[in-house]
Amino acid sequence: MKNVVVYTMKNCPYCVAAKQLLTRRGIKFEEILVREDDDAKWEELYKISGMKTMPQIFQGKDLVGGYTELTELDSQDELKSLK
């Protein structure tokens, strides 16, 4: 089982929704809060994910995506592939 990590930022409704969905499905995850002004962390994440939005969800080193991709995965297997 690979660790699920969710990068979030304050006041992000999609971040809240993603965390709620993971919790409902019994997926344990680590949340890493990224400040809006933490340019170095944003740049680091962009290099890894190609995304400039939050949340950014990883399983191990593999990018799951953001909230949209998470809900698509949920509709396919109820996130069983993340367990």
Image: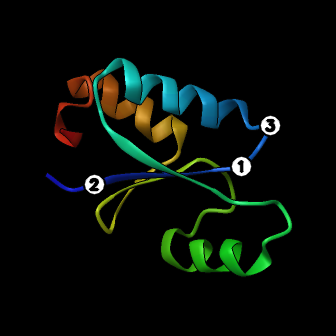
Q: What's under tag 2, amino acid-wise?
A: Asn
Q: Secondary structure at mark 2?
A: loop
Q: What's under tag 3, amino acid-wise?
A: Asn
Q: Can you give x and y, in whole percent of width and height, for residue 17 in the image?
A: 57, 26
Q: Can you give x and y, in whole percent of width and height, for residue 74 in the image?
A: 32, 26
Labels 3 and 1 touching (C-beta < 8 A): yes
Q: Can you give x and y, in whole percent of width and height, for residue 71 in the image?
A: 43, 29
Q: CA distance from mark 3 to mark 2?
A: 24 Å
Q: Earlier in the sequence, mark 2 or mark 1?
A: 2
Image point (56%, 70%), residue name: 50
Does residue 61 lie above or below 72 as drawn?
Answer: below
Q: Can you give x and y, in whole percent of width and height, for residue 65 in the image?
A: 46, 51
Give the camera-side residue of 73 and 54. 54
Left or right of residue 33: residue 75: left
Q: Secondary structure at mark 1?
A: loop
Q: CA distance from mark 2 to mark 1?
A: 20 Å
Colour scheme in use: rainbow
Q: CA distance from mark 3 to mark 1?
A: 7 Å
Give the camera-side residue of 51 and 35. 35
Residue identifier under label 1:
9
Q: Which mark is residue 3?
A: 2
Q: What's under tag 1, amino acid-wise?
A: Met
Q: Which mark is residue 61?
A: none
Residue identifier under label 3:
11
Image point (69%, 62%), residue name: 52
Tell me where residue 15 sits by quadrant.
Answer: top right
Image point (77%, 43%), residue name: 10
